[in-house]
Image (cartoon, grey):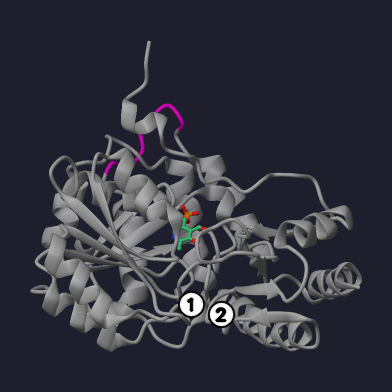
């Protein structure tokens, strides 16, 4: 038995899962959800009728998410993590004979998922400081007329936030769907959600994995025009969101104030971490997310990554990624984790 030729050539996108004291490699929240959520969730789980299929439309969850953004449930698509949302987008709007545009360096899963769904990937380059180069966007979009264009804002792994004008310009240029991935949206001062309108092919993707402290639950969603959401529903498997997850997400939204407090403290820690990194021999990129990209000025990134791991600190190794030679990405953790990371890094850099 031979797997599809095009799949054979694809590499996975996986960060190592190793047991360490300080885990700052996958941009999770360092804090668990509130204790009150844990209690409410446990109570709700006791009431679940496990012999029944879940609510296929996930209506209550979608209504609760929509309330957060001032839209109805018909403008919300929920799925098993935002990666599954992205997969639904590629299945519905991409596929054979269609292309998806990405601007690198960016979140690798956009092109990975596109390829898995048989969508051709067309690539543009970001500018030297990793900002979006609108001339390059115009070149790629006019050459390929992509059915989907991905923008990640704040961009993973560089941390950069796109200005609203970039989204407007892209919408004016492209005949296809514009997908703004805001997995880190709550850490940034503005969102493209405000730019959504019924007559614009714009959708914004969000996740419960980061700010909502619920990476274990695998829940993500998209906000967009109802017509686009309807089209996306057509490619989801029946009952794709289990009842436990629907309850977890719906209840989490009741603790928005606590979520905002966590975000505020992570943003404050991000500032401290940037300041701490600036005292060391590393180049640091500004970040609007809960992670920071940096590059040791001497020595190779792989050796620094290994040196940190030897001290039980795990960060993301981007050293071999195109245009990110020697770079590492650290997630903002608790104050203690950040201290431990800075101390280990100072030691590794000597
Ligand atoms: C930009 C971006 N989009 C999507 C995801 C996937 O998140 P989820 O856990 O919701 O699938 C991530 C996870 O790291 C991410 O960085």
Going 41% across and 56% down the picture, which residue do you hit?
220
| SS label for mark 2 | helix
Task: Determine whether 23 is above or below 2 in the image.
Answer: below
Q: Nearer the viewer, residue 83 or 143?
A: 143
Q: Position of residue 97 (x, y in %)?
A: 12, 43
Relative horizontal placement of residue 115, taking residue 225 as reference (left or right): right
What segment carries the magenta color? 50-56
Q: Position of residue 275 (x, y in %)?
A: 74, 89
- Tell me the residue that label 1 is attached to: 186
Main secondary structure along the magenta-highlighted residues? loop
Going 73% across and 63% down the picture, which residue do you hit?
300
Q: Position of residue 312 (x, y in %)?
A: 86, 55
Task: Determine whether 82 is above or below 265 in the image.
Answer: above
Q: Earlier in the sequence, mark 2 or mark 1?
A: 1
| SS label for mark 1 | helix
- Tell me the residue that label 2 is attached to: 260
Label pair 2/1, CB-CB below 8 angstroms: yes
User: How many badges with numbers are in the image?
Assistant: 2
Disc sitting over residue 72 in the figure: none
């Amino acid at each position: 038995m031979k797997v599809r030729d095009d799949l054979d050539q694809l590499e996975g996108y996986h960060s190592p899962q190793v047991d360490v004291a300080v885990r700052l490699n996958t941009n999770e929240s360092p804090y668990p959800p509130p204790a009150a959520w844990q209690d409410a969730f446990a109570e709700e789980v006791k009431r679940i009728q496990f012999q029944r299929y879940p609510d296929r439309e996930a209506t209550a969850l979608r209504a609760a998410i929509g309330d957060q953004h001032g839209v109805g449930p018909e403008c919300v698509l929920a799925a098993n993590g935002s990666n599954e949302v992205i997969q639904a987008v590629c299945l519905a709007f991409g596929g054979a004979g269609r292309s998806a545009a990405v601007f690198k360096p960016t979140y690798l899963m956009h092109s990975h998922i596109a390829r898995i769904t048989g969508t051709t990937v067309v690539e543009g380059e970001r500018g030297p400081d990793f900002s979006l180069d609108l001339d390059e966007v115009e070149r790629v979009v006019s050459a390929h007329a992509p059915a989907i264009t991905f923008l990640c804002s704040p961009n993973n792994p560089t941390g950069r936030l796109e200005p609203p004008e970039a989204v407007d310009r892209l919408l004016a240029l492209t005949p296809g769907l514009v997908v703004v991935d805001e997995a880190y949206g709550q850490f940034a001062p503005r969102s493209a959600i405000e730019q959504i309108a019924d007559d614009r092919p714009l959708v914004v993707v969000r996740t419960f994995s980061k700010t909502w402290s619920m990476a274990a639950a695998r829940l993500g969603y998209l906000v967009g025009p109802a017509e686009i959401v309807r089209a996306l529903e057509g490619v989801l498997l029946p009952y794709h969101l289990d009842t436990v997850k629907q309850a977890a997400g719906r209840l989490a939204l009741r603790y928005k104030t606590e979520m905002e407090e966590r975000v505020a403290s992570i943003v404050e820690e991000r500032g401290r971490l940037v300041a701490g990194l600036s005292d060391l021999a590393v180049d640091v990129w500004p970040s609007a997310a809960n992670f920071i990209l940096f590059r040791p000025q001497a020595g190779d990134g792989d050796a620094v990554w290994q040196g940190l791991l030897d001290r039980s600190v795990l960060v993301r190794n981007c050293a071999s990624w195109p245009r990110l030679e020697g770079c590492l990405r650290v997630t903002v953790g608790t104050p203690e984790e950040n201290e431990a990371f800075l101390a280990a890094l100072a030691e590794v850099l000597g």
